[in-house]
Amino acid sequence: MVGQLFSPPALKRYGPQIIQLVEQLITELATPGLPLSQAKGIQQTQNIPQTKYLNQAQGLPLAPRLRRFAFEVIATVVLGLRGQNLEALFLDFEIWSKGLFALPLAIPGTAFAQALAARGRLLQQLQSLLVEAQQAAARGEPWAAAGLDLLAGGLDEAGLPLSEADLVEQLLLLLFAGYETTASTLSCLMLALLQQPQLLAWLGEELDQLAWPPAADQVAAAYDPTRAPRLDAVVQEVMRYTPPVGGFFRLTTAEVVLDGVLVPAERVVQVALAASNRYANGSESHNLDLFRPQRHLDGGCPANLLPFGAGERVCLGRSLAELEIRLLAVGLLQRLRLELVPGQNLDLQMFPSPTPKAGLLVRLRP
Ligand code: HEM
């Protein structure tokens, strides 16, 4: 059922709306003196200093805005959520995701306790949204004409209606899976490019040849690897270098030999992407500790990359993630000449997904 949300016709429908969100972000970043009210709450939850305007010398944190963009794609474009609760929903997701890897001490005031409280509020809000969608569907008026309606009438594998609790959990999972990882990729991509102007110039040669925005009927394919191979290489390298999902688990159903090691059947194997992405397996000359997108074009990547997992449980949102990453990268980099504010802390926080700790302060190049 959830797979339908990411089918090719669905992606075709989402394209123009994602472009609109990219355009909104471009306007927000490019308009001197435009108060950035929406971003206030984000900066508060992330302890990032509040700045109002992009062209102020101290710059503007880009990473929280990329998180907000990715959240809007899954929440509004895919699931069809809307209304004033959206802002509250987003802020609670931010609190929840921040507390996911905190020490599990439910002492009032700790990040973990705040995350538990946020999760409770999230479940409540999602439940009332779902009830609204179900009531509208019963009246024959689809509420959101999007994913929420599909989920509201959802059936399990045996064809029985899913319980309300199951549906709410599904929504929570989809929202979280749908923005945390994509936002991480976008932030790390912008960080890598802005840190290395020669790389940005190399990619810029390709971006200059691409039309922005793409024609409505071309959105899904406009920047695919055949038309934008350098962009594809940069995205692949970002996911190799700073994998948004650190790994996943599999149970062996039969004996298997992994890199010369015999693993018996019925064993849990952890696929640790951060480690395997830099494992050259005898081809050390490729220096996998270096961020070098060109390796994906010149055969310099001996590692087997699985950023979206593999097999039956492969990431359901892969095509959506790839689409929104490409659209945002082309739109933002074509329309704006950004630079990093000097002297900022560019270290990454690694959990739940890699993201610049200090929010990635950027400003317009003079
Ligand atoms: C750069 C972005 C993303 C990355 C790197 C990523 C990565 C992953 C990985 C590694 C898995 C586990 C796969 C496995 O066990 O083989 C996964 C599962 C999943 N992802 Fe993503 N993901 C991304 C974006 C998204 C988006 C936008 C959605 C949309 C909602 C999404 C929805 C899901 C779902 C529902 C699953 C569970 C699939 C299942 O268990 O059958 N992901 N993802």
Image (cartoon, rainbow, N blue to C red):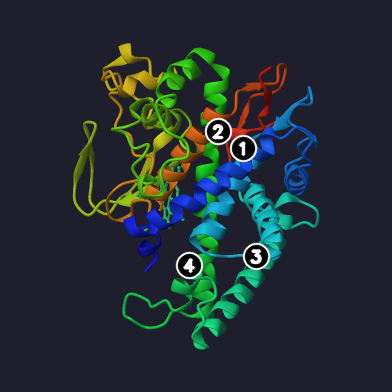
- Which residue type carries mark 2? Leu
Q: Is mark 2 within 8 Å of ligand 1?
A: no
- Say which mark, if any, is on residue 146: 4
**Is the residue under label 1 in contact with that under label 2 (CB below 8 Å)?**
yes
Sooner in the amino-acid sequence: mark 4 or mark 2? 4
Residue positioned 66% across, 70% down in the render? 125
At mark 1, the secondary structure is: helix
- Which residue type carries mark 1? Ile
Indicate which label's residue lies in the foreground, 3 or 4. 4
**Is the residue under label 2 in contact with that under label 3 (CB below 8 Å)?**
no
Front-most of residues 353 and 257: 353
Residue positioned 35% across, 30% down in the render? 228
Q: Mark 3 Cα within 10 Å, few/some/many (few <14, many 20+)? A: many
Indicate which label's residue lies in the foreground, 3 or 1. 1
Indicate which label's residue lies in the foreground, 4 or 1. 1
Q: Which residue is mark 2?
A: 332
**Is the residue under label 2 in contact with that under label 4 (CB below 8 Å)?**
no
Residue positioned 59% across, 28% down in the render? 336
At mark 2, the secondary structure is: helix
How far apart are the alpha carbons under marks 3 and 2? 31 Å
Q: Mark 4 Cα within 10 Å, few/some/many (few <14, many 20+)? A: some
Q: Which residue is mark 3?
A: 122
